[in-house]
Image (cartoon, grey):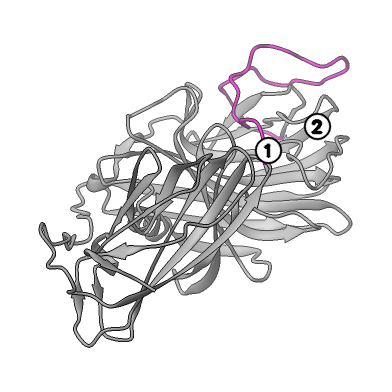
Amino acid sequence: MKRPLRAIMAVGLVAAGSIVAVALGGTASADTQICEQYGSTVIQNRYVVQNNRWGTTAQQCINVTSTGFEITTQNGSNPTNGAPTAYPSVFFGCHYTNCSPGTNLPMQVSQISSATSSINYRYVSGAIYNASYDIWLDPSPKRDGVNQMEIMIWLNRQGSIQPIGSPVGNANIDGRNWEVWRGNNGGNNVISYLAPSAISSANLNLLAFINDTRNRGAITNSWYLTSIQAGFEPWQGGTGLAVTNFSAAVNGGGNNPPPTTTPPPSNPPPGSAACAVKYTANSWNNGFTADVQITNTGSSTINGWTLTYSLPSGQQVTNAWNATVSQSGSSVTARNVGHNGTIAPGGTASFGYQGTLSGAYSNPSSFTLNGTQCR
């Protein structure tokens, strides 16, 4: 699904009848109610709680406590195949120039030794929503505007909603199995980790999710972590949903090297690989995703691979994972990344990408691996 940017700087627009107990950036001591569209306040002199009603004109209010917040009014209603109404949340770091007190973010990924967070949610029935983390990263140490990479961790979802993009596999991270989705919302790339069942309380190693995103080729260690956010995306209803406790910490002084890259051979000898390629695509009006699986059907191990082929007219690759993919005209070149450069006899390596589409969709017709045509 497509959706506009949920993070928009507050511009002082207050709906008629809104109750705003504190100004932007104030500190909450007693419970504080915020109905202002982008109103926020500070708790524990460490975290920012924001109303962030970006996807509807209907009123939403939150009650902010010393440890979290509760949605007390949520009058918006959006169809489940579109964007949510809001992202009321608590965060550590910087969000559209609003930085939590004393934060050490942005911090370069290579310098992070640990990034952790704990949360307790209170759920309600009868509403359509997700309970999710947003972890934002960018090539520059941005404190304003939208970041280029969004990691979402869905701890719960209710109703017929789904992450942005399409599923690309599974990952075992932090002792749990997650379904991984990948896509773009029109403003930034998104990788989502979807829990198979609801989680109401968690202690998360967020650096493990960041590293998995890096290993998929979506970021590098030179990128910056800018904020850690947790809250709800309601589509319909949601009054009573609450974050009852939240904490987050990022420690520097790390040495977080990327995986060792196995480069492809500079001049691969003809006939050095026997291979088969399975190409699975999902297309829609103006875009598509493709998952590509390479099988080594030969008797020798492939150490480093380069797959070349031509995309039919009207297809353009926009972002890829598990391979370095470049396109010149219709010609596509995909090279392995560090963790999938070796393919044993009978083994496979996989990668995928998203692209734009103009006209009717069709698959590539032939593939060449290290100079040898695959079947």
- In the image, which residues are magenta? 2-31
| Residue positioned 51% across, 73% down in the render | 176
In front of the other: 172 or 368: 368
Check the picture and name the quadrant holding the N terminus: top right
Residue 364 image point, x, y percent = 47, 57
The crowd level at tag 1 (other Cα within 10 Å; few <14, some 14-19, many 20+) is many
Residue in front for this viewpoint, 231 or 181:
181
Q: Which amino acid type is marked by label 2?
A: Gln
Query: In this rendering, is residue 338 above or below 284?
Result: below
> In the visual, does 291 lie left or right of 8?
left
Q: Amino acid at mark 1?
A: Pro
In the image, residue 150 lies in the stretch drawn in magenta = no
Estimate the x, y position of residue 172 in percent, counting from the top left: 46, 72
**Residues tagged 1 and 2 counted as in contact (Cβ below 8 A):** yes
Q: Residue at x 68, y 42 (%)?
A: 285
Q: Determine which of the numbered discs, if any, sits on residue 60 in the image.
A: 2
Residue 9 is a magenta residue: yes
Question: What residue did someone put label 1 on?
Answer: 88
Q: Is residue 342 above or below residue 166?
A: below
- What is the C-alpha distance between the residues marked 1 and 2? 9 Å
